[in-house]
Image (cartoon, rainbow, N blue to C red):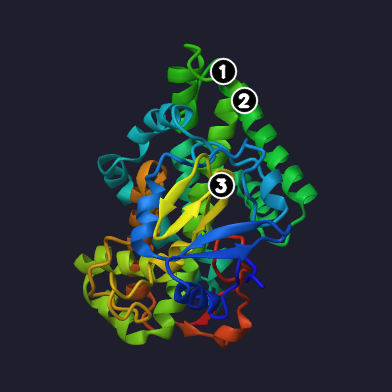
Amino acid sequence: MLPTFPMSRQCPYHPPSGYDALRQDGPLAKVRLYDGRTAWAVTGYAETRQLLVDPRLSSDRSRPDFPVLVPRMAAAKLVALVGMDPPEHDVQRRMLIPSFTVKRVNSLRPAIRRTVVERIEALLASGRREADLVPEFALPVPSTVICELLGVPYTDHEFFEEQTRRMLLATSTAEEAAAASGALVRYFDELIEAQLDEPREGLVGELIAERFRPGELGREELASIAMFLLVAGHETTANMIALSVLTLLEHPEQLDRLRADEKGAGDAVEELLRFLSVADELQRVAASDIEIAGHVIREGDAVYLPNAAANRTPEVFPDPDVLDLGRSARGHLAFGYGIHQCIGQNLARAELEIALYELAVRLPGLRLAEPVEQLGTKPGGSVQGILRLPVVW
């Protein structure tokens, strides 16, 4: 009997235990999805990299044979960039990449730091000695940053955060995901409408002026791109911030290491990205037969590439289950690999470096208020993370 996929984590900062069993069957193993369909799960690091650059694996979510992990995935219309193949994918990526270069992100670092510090100072000024860092820190930091980048009013954050949650939570129904997706598309269509005559500052306004008005980008496509950037720009980073804080609190010697070396924050973040791999379960469908590692992936086969498994490959990362902020983890696959590698990775790195370092320095007495087992781990089939992060200081 084939193991079911996706698999859920028993500990929020370790991959599902079932990944070890899959790895014992070699770098590729067969699994069964919720609807009875079989799929390949790729656990090997080298094989994952090889397949992520293979043009015979399609990311086109409009294909009728494209696999889904849970019913709501087919209804959540996140097709911009991640759900496209070349040449459409390449056109959109070239259009957006100037806004996410290292140089551009470095220019945003003072604003990111200001946002982070304001959130921490608000916690300190509250007079309390406890908080849930998910709604009070991990979520508002990336939400504020992506709103400023896109030119979206932060006053609308409760609306789009709730719609994102309904769209991406693995337990949401297809109907709930479709309704949330539709609400976000309508939101951005109205935002675009309001800027047609006078585009505002921000990426949405730039795309209206430079791409929509000349006819290079349709209105529906622009709304889809904006929705994708908003959702991806806050959801994944928010989960990563919260889970990183939890992991560091559970590994106090590593937290002390981060606190003592601001220059080492970049390497620390790379190791946390490898160790946590919150954006797990990359999915593809084979557009033609592929021979790899003694197997043949047939045309139409579903393929899943759980990077949490690849990032724990011992031949690549010695003692992979050990968190070591001093290791060189820059070859990790937490942002994917190849043409679909996360376009916002530079922004995510900057937010993580600043948020984690400032929190460690400004709240040196930070500690968990409840056992890890009580925090609630998000199920497989969604961005990995925790539901709550109650702390005291």
Tell me which residue sits at (58%, 49%) in the image.
301
| Three-letter code for the amino acid on which mark 2 is drawn | Glu
Q: Is residue 170 above or below residue 359?
A: above
Q: Which mark is residue 196?
A: 1
Q: Which mark is residue 220?
A: 2
Q: How many marks?
A: 3
Q: Nearer the viewer, mark 3 or mark 1?
A: 3
Cα separation between marks 3 and 1: 23 Å
Residue at which label 3 appears: 231
Position of residue 178 measured from the top left corner of the image (x, y, whole percent): 74, 44
| Three-letter code for the amino acid on which mark 3 is drawn | Val
Tell which of 170 and 203 is nearer to you.
170
| Residue 364 in sight here | yes
**Contact flag, marks 2 and 3 (Cβ < 8 Å):** no
Task: Please rate how many residues cluster around mark 3, counting C-alpha atoms within 10 Å: few if below 14, some from 14 to 19, many from 20.
Answer: many
Q: Horizontal placement of 341 versus 29: left or right?
A: left
| Three-letter code for the amino acid on which mark 1 is drawn | Leu
Cα separation between marks 2 and 3: 17 Å
